[in-house]
Image (tube, rainbow, N blue to C red):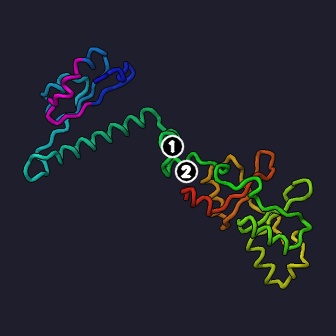
Amino acid sequence: GDLGMITDHDVVLAISYSGTAAEIMTILPVIKRKGVPLICLTGDPQSAMATTANVHLDGSVQEEACPLGLAPTTSTTVALVLGDALAMALLEARGFTPEEFAFSHPGGRLGRRLLLKVRDVMHAGEAIPRVGPQTLLSEALLEISRKGLGMTTVVDAEGVLRGVFTDGDLRRTLDSGKDIHKTRIQDVMSVHSKKIQENALATEAVLMMQENRIYTLLVTDASQALTGVIRMHDLLQANVV
């Protein structure tokens, strides 16, 4: 086949327990002519591959686990262990970071935990429940029901965030005996709501919720303007938790 994908910036790692695999022996002369470093992992230090390699890794075993002594079993485990050790040594030598790993595996849980931002998961724009400070509680409950987030933000005419009203606030209001048709939202809202920056990692939102025992955070931009709402349920759906 085509060996053009092998460049002088590469290192070839060839694995063959016998050290004489025909498919590898065929390309060894080309690899040597290219001047590419060759590492061979074999079970025979005297094999053609072992003696040709720049570096030989001895993966020999006394016997295979296969009761017939035929199927590679113990030797494949040794090859796996040596390969893992080589990979970890290279990782440490290069200073490879979790962030680099995440960029190569964006679909996995680690990738999501290290790459997913709050802005990627939050509810934004028209999806944000909003009412004014003078809104009656009964009308605010309609907004909460329409948007389906279990809460509403309270903003003034200039769009400045004044507070938040959650299901917990509703329970406390009902326990106090207040009439929802006469009570203004500004009189029962929470003014010290927890906020997080939209550029923060989604995992930071999880930690903030856990530390404060809450299930919803308001999201702001660099100027502290409200840009979204994020819930623990959203983070669970995104497989961040």
At x 64%, y 49%, the residue is 120
> Pointer 2: what residue?
113
Q: Do the residues labelled 2 and 1 touch (CB within 8 Å)?
A: yes
Q: What residue type is labelled 2?
A: Arg
At x 66%, y 68%, the residue is 213
89 with respect to 219 (left or right): left
At x 32%, y 20%, the residue is 36
Q: What residue type is labelled 1?
A: Ala
Along the line of sight, the residue nearer the viewer: 165 or 58: 165
At x 22%, y 43%, the residue is 78
Along the line of sight, the residue nearer the viewer: 142 or 109: 142
Which portion, as a residue range, is magenta? Answer: 14-29
Q: Which mark is residue 102?
A: 1
Q: Residue 191 carries which label?
A: none
Specify few, some or many for label 2: CA neighbours under 10 Å numbering under 14, 14-19, or 20 or more.
Answer: many
Residue 203, above or below 211: above
